[in-house]
Image (tube, helix red, strand yellow):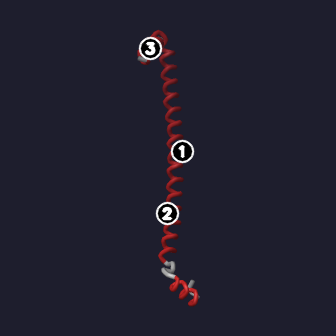
Amino acid sequence: MWGSLMVGILAPVIARPWARRGTGIALAALTITLFILNLRRQGERAGRAAERIDQLERSHAIQRQMLDAASRRPRSRDELLDRLRGGRF
């Protein structure tokens, strides 16, 4: 619907060669502008995704450290006392 409306409005104007050339240049400029804006938006998305991956890697590293520390902890009070007496804590 919009296309036929635009053709009806612009048909007398586009019949002139200079108007046709101007319309082509305007469409090319619009296409390039939209392409550049899309590249910018994709770059922002990629940056956010990279930041999210870095945050996940940091949280996984901290989680691994906590699991390693938990695996080395004393299992009972007696084991804790043995470690404290032995100076291995």
70 up-or-down from 31: above or below: below
Residue 64 is situated, as x and y percent measured from the top left of the image, at 49, 68
* Residue labelled with disc 3: 5
N-term-proximal mark, 3 vs 1: 3
Q: Secondary structure at mark 3?
A: helix
The residue positioned farthest toward the bottom in the image shown: 86
Circle 1 crowding by C-alpha within 10 Å: few under 14, some 14–19, many from 20: few
82 up-or-down from 41: above or below: below
Q: Residue flagged by tag 3: what amino acid is it?
A: Leu
Q: Residue flagged by tag 2: what amino acid is it?
A: His
Residue 68 is situated, as x and y percent measured from the top left of the image, at 49, 73
29 up-or-down from 2: above or below: below
Which callout, 2 or 3, points to the residue nearer the camera?
2
> Are circles 2 and 3 on residues that touch, CB within 8 Å?
no
Q: CA distance from mark 2 to mark 3?
A: 57 Å
Residue 9 is situated, as x and y percent measured from the top left of the image, at 47, 11
In the picture, the disc for residue 44 is 1
Quadrant where the N terminus lies? top left
The residue positioned farthest toward the top in the image shown: 12
Which callout, 1 or 2, points to the residue nearer the camera?
2
Quadrant where the C terminus lies? bottom right
Q: Residue flagged by tag 1: what amino acid is it?
A: Glu
N-term-proximal mark, 1 vs 2: 1
